[in-house]
DNA sequence: TTAATTAAAATTGTATACAAAATACAAAAT
DNA sequence: ATTTTGTATTTTGTATACAATTTTAATTAA
């Protein structure tokens, strides 16, 4: 075993395959062949296998085939997101520390002025700060499992620069700062609904 | 390879280990050793490994150890349950078919007159019918995973019949029958809160 | 042409080997 | 007696081998 990489072969395989799927480098419907991926990534089949199993759990792969989420899948994910993140926003209005609120505000600012890459990161962070504030490990894990698919969204939304997206973040941030739970929840729900609608609109065209 | 079993070694391993964990045959906190399990089940480490990975995804195992759910875990799970099942109850008031409502009512009736075994099943079915009515696969999967942990938790406590449990089910059923979404959601939330409180009360004693 | 048959190749499931990492344990030092 | 150190032991991660299964392609029969 002459490993030079810092992370395990399995972790490396998992991330590589996942990213290739999410970036469209591996198209939907493609059959994943263990040997082929192994050669490509310079590892043996064993870690590839485990990576595939994990991706299967995340519903990105089924039967060794890449499955891109359908519109129904997206709607279902958002129904859950709206409930969980809505609640987290409400809790945030009550519990978020002043420092965290500053962090949140920073995400909004980057959203206005940053590069696309930075905006992607900031948007992710925005939602994470709110979720983390609720301090529910179970909820965080559930959201984590949906991240792969949410990433797909975020890309569309940021890349096509959805109007008002950052304004909405700003409003949510204000509601939290003003310690207004009802409003924070309501705004978060509206925000997510708008995100979904925008995404589905683009889906329909391609 | 002299296979006589009808199912794959992996499937067999997965089911065996899962059942052992859920039945308490493998106690909470136990470290799972691949080689040992392999010998026990008469297969090699490879399928055992994959089974463990899967169980890790299902939160029944963490770091090769059988999880030991804490009170905090239960609170967190119920916070999520209340959101998801509350929503499902609301949707049920709008969308549940008359036949499904009859099924639901049957669960309530069995809850009043059945044997302990039957009551357990009926209560589970009651929640399932409502969840299924919402027709969200993502949500169903999330609940499914939490079910295992709830089961594990319940294991440690003697199962007592909680007062009013069936009355609450009955009320929820009525609200759905009356097509009253607000009330259905509210009652479901109250019901789950009471459930948690009862759980934790017994936990504190043991 | 299409459908059925079969041989060859590709792919997977499982077992096994082995080095690296983690753990347990005894002996030495404080 | 406790801590430290070194050594054996266990356990894991990864690679590899091979038989079983599945897929593909070619060939023949309709």
Image (cartoon, coloured by chain):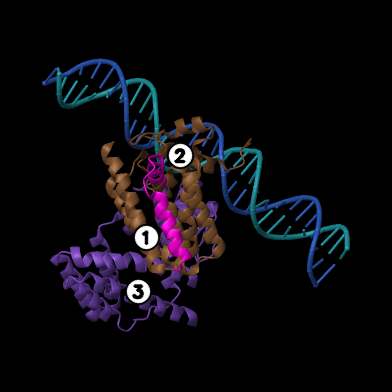
Chain colours: A brown, B purple, C cyan, D blue
- CA gap between label 2 and label 1 equals 31 Å
**What chain is tagged by disc 3?**
B
Quadrant assignment for the N terminus of chain A: top right
| Proximity of marks 3 and 2: CB atoms separated by less than 8 Å | no
| Proximity of marks 2 and 1: CB atoms separated by less than 8 Å | no
The image quarter in which residue B194 lies: bottom left
| Secondary structure mostly seen in the magenta stretch | helix
Quadrant assignment for the C terminus of chain A: top left
**What chain is tagged by disc 2?**
A
Q: Is residue A104 above or below residue B195?
A: above
Crowding at dot 2, Cα within 10 Å, few <14 / some 14-19 / many 20+, comes out as: some
N-terminal-most mark, 2 or 1:
2
Task: Judge from the rendering whether residue A193 lies leftward or rightward of residue A43; answer left or right.
Answer: left
Magenta stretch in the rendered image? A151-179
* Secondary element at image label 1: helix
- CA gap between label 3 and label 2 equals 39 Å
Q: Are marks 3 and 1 on the same chain?
A: no
Percent across and percent down for residue A75 are: 30, 51
* Secondary element at image label 3: helix
Query: Residue placed at 37% from the left, 49% from the top?
Result: A164
Does residue A31 appear anywhere in the picture?
A: yes
**What chain is tagged by disc 1?**
A
Q: Determine which residue is flagged by label 3.
A: B192
Nearer the observer, disc 2 or disc 1? 1
Crowding at dot 3, Cα within 10 Å, few <14 / some 14-19 / many 20+, comes out as: some
Q: Please tell me the numbered disc located at residue A19.
A: 2
- CA gap between label 3 and label 1 equals 27 Å
Give yes or no for residue A109 being in the magenta stretch: no
* Secondary element at image label 2: helix
Q: Determine which residue is flagged by label 1.
A: A187
The residue closer to the viewer here, A95 or A5, is A95
């Amino acid at each position: 075993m002459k490993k030079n990489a810092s992370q395990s072969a399995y972790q490396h395989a998992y991330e590589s395959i996942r990213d290739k799927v999410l970036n469209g480098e591996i198209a939907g419907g493609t059959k994943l062949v263990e040997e082929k991926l192994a050669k490509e990534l310079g590892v043996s089949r064993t870690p590839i296998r485990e990576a595939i199993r994990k991706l299967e759990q995340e519903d990105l792969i089924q039967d060794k085939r890449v499955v891109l989420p359908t519109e129904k899948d997206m709607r279902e994910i958002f129904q859950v997101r709206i409930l969980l993140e809505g609640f987290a926003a409400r809790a945030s209005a009550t519990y978020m520390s002043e420092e965290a609120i500053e962090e949140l505000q920073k995400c909004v600012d980057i959203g206005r002025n940053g590069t696309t890459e930075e905006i992607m990161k900031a948007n992710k962070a925005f939602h994470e700060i709110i979720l983390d504030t609720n301090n529910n490990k179970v909820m965080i894990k559930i959201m984590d499992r949906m991240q792969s698919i949410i990433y797909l969204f975020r890309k569309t939304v940021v890349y096509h620069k959805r109007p008002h997206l950052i304004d909405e973040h700003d409003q949510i941030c204000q509601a939290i700062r003003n310690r207004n739970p009802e409003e924070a929840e309501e705004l978060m729900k509206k925000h997510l609904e708008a995100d979904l609608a925008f995404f589905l609109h683009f889906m329909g065209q391609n």
